[in-house]
Image (cartoon, rainbow, N blue to C red):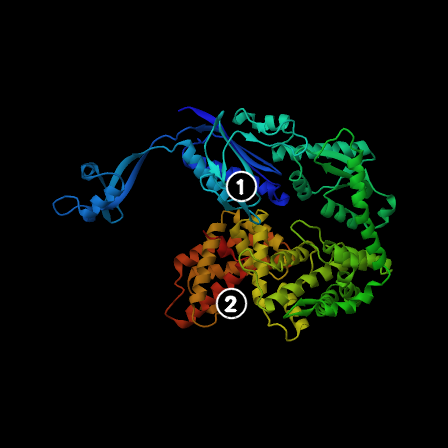
Amino acid sequence: MTTENLLVELFVEELPPKALKKLGDAFAGVLFEQLKAQGLAGADAVLTSFASPRRLAAHVTGVAARAADKAVSQKLMPVSVGLDANGAPTPALLKRLGALGADASAVASLKRAPDGKAEALFYDSVQPGVDLTAGLQKALDEAIAKLPIPKVMSYQLETDCELPGWTSVNFVRPAHGLVALHGADVVPVKALGLKAGNATHGHRFEAAVDPVVLADADAYAATLAKDGAVIASFAERRADIVRQLAAAAAQVGGGCRPIDDEALLDEVTALVERPNVLICQFEKEFLDVPQECLILTMKANQKYFPLLDAAGKLTNRFLVVSNISPADASAVIQGNERVVRPRLADAKFFFDQDRKRPLESRVLGLAKVVYHNKLGTQGERTERVSAIARAIAQQLGGDALARQADQAALLAKADLLTDMVGEFPELQGIMGGYYARHDGLGEDIAHAIEDHYKPRFAGDELPRNIVGVVVALADKLETLVGMFGIGNLPTGDKDPFALRRHALGVVRMLVEKDLPLELDALLRSAVPAFGDKISDASAALGDFIYDRLSGSLREQGASAQEVDAVLALRPQRLADVAQRLAAVRAFAALPEAPALAAANKRVGNILKKAEGEVTAQVNEALLVEPAEKALNDSLKTVVPQANAAFVAGDLTASLQALAALKAPVDAFFDGVMVNAEDAALKANRLGLLATLHAAMNRVADLSRLAS
């Protein structure tokens, strides 16, 4: 079977830049999978995807003009339904064969094979392979239908001459061209009212020719680059931008580097067809404004790359990725400098105006800002966060820390009412820190205000000082306790109040800052701050937080069994969890571990089935059998050793001490009847098992390690 390489391109108006990479990967990926599913592309076929502002394309190697014929075995019906008592075909069987293009002559060749409890009839046939035109049409339709389009546009296309008029088309952007080449041959497919050809269009302004005619599928990228002035590959265009950014920064000198922002890089790659990086600058006086403001306005509004010096401080230079490459770029440079200046002037104006009022003067205004219709205003929320922060700080540092935490918590949301945060909501907290410094409140308070949203995402840094940790913890607890208290819980992939992220933030602060706080008590202590606005959902919230902790630990490499064993006991100090996990891992490596874990599971089941409450007490006078006496003697030796190691914080040694119990435990279950007829003996043996169970499960529930 001969094969040729295939090229499919959909030429459209400018695609949404933030979605371009995903659109390009999806278009090429679905097209490729469909070709393979139909047998037109083999397992060794190679896919290359292309995506530029005005095109989505895919190049596939080794595509056949027609797929190979395929032997197919189709189940028809049970033998009892298809054949009568004499073995003759029933009307039902003949009708089914007719639907498959066969007649009564095929009955003799039908196969019988078991199908569950009955025997069924199977019809073997050869299914002709699909030809490329039909197969590619199906693949193209599927690729377009499955595009992750953020928002669909509706536009009109003029219909064929024999059917005058207009027809509506729905797509992400109006499509103007379709290319489908199998080698040098055009594949006559259609899409979005377009017929496939061998010509596309290049750069809007710099293409050498228009249209750009493609000699064959393999000439696509090179021809577009040469005649169309377009780098069609998203990855190649992105790499070229990275190279040019680094070269431009080196040209500026002084150890300068462009700001590192992968999302911005992807977006700019999606905005240009042939990138040209230019160096621009703005007046140094704007550097008096916090650099976060300037960086944000340059990135968000203009898609510029600010330049940082060797110390990470913003310079007055920035890089522009232009879509044109004139011989004299001065006009482009001046134009971009002229555009950015008003943006920076606005930021300076907001900063200057905001500093005319102390941060504290804005706190009362939070009473007019609605937070949630069931939880009140931001002012009420601020009071709750302050109350929770004071309680936490009192435990961690007494009155002095409580006063600082209270002040920082009261001011933490005040910057929401500043002009700067009104223009750039992403700067909330950051601006509060700047304004706190301006008001002379000191670095501890300023850092706490700036950091109280942290950690904002996975891997984000934690607050820098203990005041910030307390306020951040209180802020997240207020959100979690409040939302759970009104029943506003995450469902599926919907989590509008980022409760999962808040829960992980609480976990990270408790663990990484080694805070001596017990989780259940911490959650309950936050409830009174809400008065009668919520119900107490601390138990459900605790389960939610342990679930987040469990997922986080598994992502870090801990086994599900180890995590379940540790978290089954709901350890209250989350900072101890890592040490417990290490101890469980060391215990699981012991040769005695599997037997002890199985025995522990058995003991747990026995105690669950016991009538009434079982007390972990043993009356030695009632120990009759040698095996139960031996187990009791072992417990009297091992338990003090394990407990002493536990109290000393050596959890690994505490668990490993239990290895000495394997032989007496095995002997006990081999030689002792727990459910003795004598009630006193039975109760005493259950007490012995309860003592064993308590000793074995102080660090973790070892029964969870049993296979």
Per the image, the residue denoted by label 1 is: 26
Counting the numbered discs, the total is: 2
Q: Quadrant of the N terminus?
A: top left
Q: Nearer the viewer, residue 694 or 70?
A: 70
Does residue 466 appear to the left or right of 632 in the view shown? right
Q: Residue at x 83, y 35 (%)?
A: 254
Residue 305 appears in view:
yes
Callout 2: helix, strand or loop? loop
Q: Is residue 275 above or below residue 411?
A: above
Q: Residue at x 75, y 64 (%)?
A: 409
Q: Residue at x 61, y 55 (%)?
A: 577
Identify the amino acid type marked 2. Ala
Residue 134 in the image: state x and y as whole percent: 41, 35
Identify the amino acid type marked 1. Ala
Residue 440 in the image: state x and y as whole percent: 87, 60
Q: Nearer the viewer, mark 2 or mark 1?
A: 1
Which badge, 2 or 1, is on the more N-terminal residue?
1
Does residue 485 appear to the left or right of 445 in the view shown? left
Residue 355: image quadrant is: bottom right
Find residue 424 and name its label.
none
Q: Nearer the viewer, residue 661 or 621?
A: 661
Q: CA distance from mark 2 to mark 1?
A: 62 Å
Find residue 616 and name its label.
2
Does residue 309 appear to the left or right of 599 in the view shown? right
Does residue 173 appear to the left or right of 312 in the view shown? left
Q: Residue at x 48, y 71 (%)?
A: 613
The residue furthest left is 86
Neighbour tally class for label 1: few under 14, some 14-19, many 20 plus, Cα within 10 Å: some
Q: Nearer the viewer, residue 582 or 124?
A: 124
